[in-house]
Image (spheres, rainbow, N blue to C red):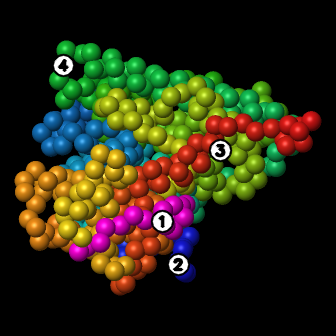
Amino acid sequence: MHFEKRDYTVNRRLLMLSAIALLIGAISTVAADVLLNLIRFFTNLFFYQSLSLADRSPAHHALGAWVIAVPAIGGLVVGLMARYGSDKIRGHGIPEAIEAVLFGKSKMSPRVAVLKPLSSGIVIGSGGPFGAEGPIIMTGGSLASLLAQYLHLTAGERKSLLVAGACAGMTAIFGTPVAAVLLAIELLLFELRPRSLLPVALACAVAGFLRPFFFESGPLFPLQTAPASTIALGSCVVAGLLCGALGAALTLTLYRTEDAFGRLPLHWMWWPAIGGLLVGIGGYFEPRALGVGYDVIGDLLNNHIAVGVAVALLTVKALIWIAALGSGTSGGVLAPLLMLGAGLGVVLAPWLPGGSPQMWALVCMAGVLGSVLGAPLTAIVFAFGLTHDTEALLPLLLTTAVAYGFSVLTMKRSIMTEKIARRGLHIYREYGVDPLERAHVAELMTRDVVSIDADLPVAEAIARYFGEHAAHRAYPVVSGARVLGMLDRAAIRGVAAGEVPAGLRCRDLLTAAAQVLVPAQTARVAAGSMAELSVARLPVVESHETMKLVGIVSLRDLLRPSGHVFHEESRRERLRGAAAA
């Protein structure tokens, strides 16, 4: 008998999802432009008292000590928006997107789609030390989720489109489509299949092609470093370890700060204002620590900031970023992490041989990002996408891998998952091929099946198949070789409790159409069908047309693939020759 097996589980709905993803890529690009214009608008309003969309840094303000109050005012406004609008706008966006994907059936509300970019524009425009990437990830994902809900798609399809919208927004902000796809794989999708990967890739590609119509084309931080020498091997290991240590310190400090805010005898609505006040104090002493800070990142990467100045600036940046984010305000984490990582590279450059100061700023930027996010591939490709520096790829790979290894060995969770864990929701981030996807019904089913003839009297069936020493709890009922359904103890018990009518046949107890499997289906489909029907056995038929019984699958059969995987992972084996000796 021939069974058709494929590498992937796909159907024609993939074409529909792909078409929708193209539209979502365009929508997210427009949303990114709107978000950046909101940030510019509020920056000009708060710091320059003008109604303008000009791209101006808050560092050049002339407010004097009054600048301390500006971020506090922005935080107060956002606290009120979160209290009376939607508390989903709090936070940096990516954990909220993860939670929606894994625990919220990828549903987001219209309020979040409107209030998230507005609140982020107010926070960042009033000097909040954040980037626009976290808010656009939440905004793009919200818009995609709303479209998917309007089209009555399944939760799985909504997930694909939500992530597509989120990553398309990131592509529009940074111009890094490949890194955005990797972010989806490492942090948002929690699966790798055409149904999810293709819509994300298409949406990011569309956003990448449309980006020049809204933003300047080319890399955000163009850079070209000299090739690293062999001695840089050891330097990259040292840099990676220090990046991992900095990432761990930032993560732990952030959540200690969040705990400290939680102990305040005030409603959480007031916390962003307090965090904003701390931001204002830091911004008074180091104005360049305010706002997104893309100009500072560029200067760090190009070695235009002295080490002493960099240390002071980045110390303030780290403190106000942690204070603001710990207060529960709205903003992103990628841009601050890029700045802090590049700053670490500037500080380490005089002590690390084998590469230029620009290279160490770049590789430490990626190392800190990969360590904190727990997404090394995203960090490596993201750093390349931001700079187009091909010479740095090898040092990027080693430094980021070491930093990621440090965080995996020392930290239970990343900055992205700790917040969700504190709500009692655990996320497991190791992905592998499901053993139930690798096995098919044809390989697991029992072919020697005990079945019940449909015309057998019920009284005789009770005596023969459902006595004290019955081998099974349910049996397929067949007419000839055609399956009519399953007869289980529950159905028999209901009849046996009273008198069994003399003419009652087994076929008379079947109240629904037969639920069956076919040999070409995966064990995952079989497990899902059993769970949905709350049964422990299902008959296997040659095809839905013939309904010819060819086997049966039980829960015990479905345990075998997982048992094989457990054996491979846990049992140590010696070389056969050594064992024989």
- Residue type marked 4: Leu
Q: Residue at x 61, y 53 (%)?
A: 381
**Image side of residue 92 versus residue 153, left or right:** right
Q: Is residue 8 visible?
A: yes
> Horizontal and vertical percent for residue 269?
19, 29
Q: Are marks 3 and 4 in contact (CB under 8 Å)?
A: no
In the rendered image, the residue lying farthest to the bottom is 545
Mark 2, secondary structure of its residue = loop
Q: Is residue 106 magenta?
A: no
- Residue type marked 1: Asp
- 193 in relation to 106, above or below: below
Q: Characterize the local packing of mark 2: few (<14), some (14-19) or many (20 or more) Cα atoms within 10 angstroms.
A: few
Mark 3, secondary structure of its residue = helix
Q: Characterize the local packing of mark 1: few (<14), some (14-19) or many (20 or more) Cα atoms within 10 angstroms.
A: few
Provide the residue span drawn in magenta.
Answer: 437-455
Kindly report the distance in space between the C-alpha atoms of the residues bearing marks 4 and 2. 63 Å
Please give the residue where the numbered disc 1 appears in the rendered image.
Answer: 448
- 509 in relation to 65, above or below: below
Which image quadrant: the C terminus?
top right
Quarter-of-image position of residue 99: top left
Of callouts 4 and 2, the N-terminal one: 2
